[in-house]
Amino acid sequence: MKPNRVSLAAPSVLAALALVLAAPAQAGDPLRGKEKSQVCAACHGADGNSPTPEFPRIGGQHQDYLLQAMLDYKAGKRKNPIMAAQVESLSTADMSDLAAWFASQRGLYVKR
């Protein structure tokens, strides 16, 4: 018996639906992130483009990468005492908002 088009498309439709439903769970609000970013600006710069080579430039970085980095610092998977202390009291929503803010900024990709 030959599979019909509906049965062949069902896995693709289900996968797409799962992605759409999962996205809002980690989608942050860049405007709320901007409000929360003052502490971050001390090292990373107001727009995430650190003026010194001692601190990473995070402006324009992928939102999911930034969020995962903060979650990893909070969980102790990434080791940095400064960052661990900074994210310690942040909720996942706070980190999502910060990630959205810095991801929405233009990165400066120049050699130092």
Image: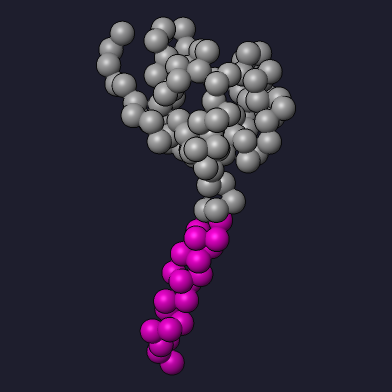
Front residue of this view, candidates 91 and 75: 91
Quick one: quadrant of the C terminus?
A: top left
Is 25 positioned to the left or the right of 54 in the image?
right
Q: Residue furthest left?
A: 110
Tell which residue pokes out farthest to the right in this image: 89
Q: Give how far across and how far down residue 76 sits, in percent.
A: 68, 24
Query: Of residues 106 and 22, which is closer to you in this image?
Result: 106
Examine the rendered structure and indicate whether residue 47 appears above or below residue 13.
above
Relative to 2, does residue 32 appear above or below in the rendering?
A: above
Range of residues picked out in magenta: 1-22
In the image, what residue occupies the spot 55% across and 21% down? 38
**Magenta-drawn stretch contains 17:** yes
Q: Quadrant of residue 109?
A: top left
| Residue 72 among those drawn in magenta | no
Which residue shows up at 55% across the image and 61% down it?
21
Q: How many marks?
A: 0
What secondary structure is the stretch in magenta mostly built from?
helix
**Location of residue 74 with respect to 110 vertically, above or below:** below
Residue at screen point 55% across, 37% down? 32
